[in-house]
Image (cartoon, helix red, strand yellow):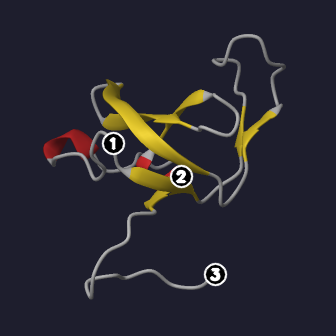
Amino acid sequence: MQRDEIELNDPPVFEIGEKVRVKKLIKNDGTFPGREIGEVLAKIGDVGYVASIGTFLQAYYIYAVHFLDTGYIIGCRKRELESAEEKSHESHATDE
């Protein structure tokens, strides 16, 4: 298993309050209380807002994302998210 880059060498990709969209299905890995392990917490395309930013293993940022539709606040990695903010002519969004 190859270790990812150490994200903490750079500033966070997302900011508190930023609107983000889920790029990967997020299931409970046992760290979300009150839900069964394996239960889907967020689906691809779900939109939420970054509520806080923490770190994990002194290497990664964890973005606490508040999903208003479910009320869940889920810790997400950078690779699981993309910005959902409207950007002027700088947008790099693609249709997937």
The residue labelled by disc 2 is 80
Q: Residue at x 82, y 31 (%)?
A: 38
Q: Which mark is residue 17?
A: 1
Give the structural element (helix, strand or loop) at label 1. loop
Cα–Cα gap, marks 1 and 2: 17 Å
| Mark 1 neighbour class, 10 Å CA radius: few under 14, some 14 to 19, many 20 or more | few
Looking at the image, residue 18 sits to the left or right of residue 46; the answer is left
Query: In which quadrant is the C terminus drawn?
Result: bottom right
The reply to whether the C-beta atoms of the residues labelled 1 and 2 are less than 8 Å apart is no
The residue labelled by disc 3 is 96
Where is residue 88 shown, x and y percent of the image? 27, 81
Where is residue 18 shown, x and y percent of the image? 35, 49
Cα–Cα gap, marks 3 and 2: 15 Å
| Mark 2 neighbour class, 10 Å CA radius: few under 14, some 14 to 19, many 20 or more | some
Cα–Cα gap, marks 3 and 1: 25 Å
Query: Closer to us: mark 1 or mark 2?
Result: 1
